[in-house]
Amino acid sequence: MAPRCWHWWHWSAWRRTRPPLPGSTPSFRQRFSTQEQPPQICVVGSGPAGFYTAQHLLKHHPQAHVDIYEKQLVPFGLVRFGVAPDHPEVKNVINTFTQTARSARCAFRGNVVVGRDVAVPELRAAYHAVVLSYGAEDHRALEIPGEELPGVFSARAFVGWYNGLPENRELAPDLSCDTAVILGQGNVALDVARILLTPPEHLEKTDITEAALGVLRQSRVKTVWIVGRRGPLQVAFTIKTSPARGRGSQNCCFEQPRRSQGQRTLPARHRPPAPGASAFSEAPSRCCHHQTGDGQQAFAWQSPDWRQVSCYSKIPAFSSLPTPARCCPHSPQQGVAEAARAVPTGDTEDLPCGLVLSSVGYKSRPIDPSVPFDPKLGVIPNMEGRVVDVPGLYCSGWVKRGPTGVIATTMTDSFLTGQMLLQDLKAGLLPPGPRPGYAAIEALLSSRGVQPVSFSDWEKLDAEEVSRGKGAGKPREKLLDPQEMLGLLGH
């Protein structure tokens, strides 16, 4: 994805240096990158963005030292807490991150909340550069009455619950209903639908938490509706996440509501490409497209137990659960190409259900008053990773570009930020002279009663998790209670 640009960025905020005249002696600032004093760099966040940024810095600067700060006691962020348990191959990237963390020039500092335990200006005073890679730790609200009622959850919280995120361990969703509705049609929505409908015995050998597995064993959910604003050819999920692929028990149905008279479907050549669209065309033996008697279009597999309903908008409709979730059908496209907009028809339909999960996107939060933040876009204003008007401060990952893309997208994005930082270091645009790095921050944290967790501490917790899972044939049984973790470490 191309980096987002803010037109109010002023390069004057970054001091420029001119090449030295022939015969002149380079200044200290110009010779900085060749000095024996290693640059001290701080990365905030230990998910893919943080580790890929650190990896690039360590690989391309032989003297750089990188400290990675993380608010959780354990590393790896979204790889550990976001990737679905039935996709273990995606988590193999942890092996690469572990190699980075074990480098003599890298250190993991877990259990440190930047913005609370230590301020960003304090980090900037201790390091030559600070990179914010803390991701998107919130969800986008529906902003309609009723979303706070029992039985309505964010998909982010639901994912955190079955993946062992400590803050979501008490979620306790009620799965005694037979129908669930998911609002949104991205990868997270499809992950949630797949977990809800996968037979529990197929999850027993994954790293899903035992608490979540116990609830899923008692689940009575048989049907999952996935509601989206756009049509099936514009779905946001990738093919890999679709329940239509893989397990034969997960048959599915794609429906598009009747269009009002005079409304038309945008020609295929004008439709924006969709990552999952080819899932509907590459398996004609399993899927048929037909026109129903009332003008409804449907892509249908036999005996559907999950259904995607496209071209609906959210409207206030949650009175109490279990009740219907109310949706408003609209024309899937009016306009051409990127100017296409969904237009409500004024009609409403009720979907009887006992569980509603909102999956309309993740959202980053501001981390510190000293750091610029765009609340509308939910990102830190930046130019190729350089934070606007704050020399020496950078960002990577979702907090840089927004919560889009897959892990490979974040890798490319983070490498670019690392490249920009090293360019500025070479050009003498970062503070000269030695910086204390973690030595200064350690003193601050100690005075504030904060007990950081090292990567060797994490490896002890990792061994404990693996040991607990071994008896059940699982790769691990995740620790959920931070106090238990600290107790195991003797903190």
Image (cartoon, helix red, strand yellow):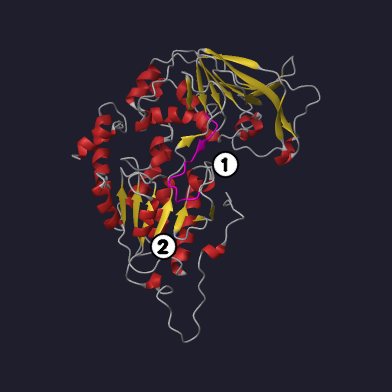
Residue 216's x, y, as percent?
Answer: 40, 19
Identify the image quadrant of the C terminus. Answer: top left
Is 258 placed above or below 116 here? above
Instruction: Of the two numbered discs 2 and 1 on the same chain, state the one appearing first in sequence.
Output: 2
- Whether residue 341 is visible to the viewer of this picture, yes or no, is yes
Provide residue 19's location: percent of width, then percent of height: 51, 77
Structural crowding at the residue carrying mark 2, measured as other residues with C-alpha within 10 Å and reported as few (<14), some (14–19) or many (≥20)? few
Vertical relation: 72 (above or below) 294: below
Q: Are marks 2 and 1 in contact (CB under 8 Å)?
A: no
Q: Residue furthest bottom?
A: 23
Label 2 SS? helix
Q: Main SS of the magenta segment?
A: loop
- Please state the extent of the stretch shown in magenta in the rendering: 359-372
What residue is disc 1 on?
376
Gap between marks 2 and 1, in whole Å? 35 Å
Residue type at tag 2: His
Residue 42 visible to the viewer = no
243 left or right of 256 in image: left
| Mark 1 neighbour density, 10 Å: few (under 14) some (14–19) many (20 or more) | few
In-image side of 187 versus 218 (left or right): right
Q: Please state which of the two labelled residues, at mark 2 or mark 1, is closer to the viewer.
A: 1
What numbered label is drawn on residue 60? Answer: 2
The percent coordinates of residue 175 (x first, y second) are 44, 16
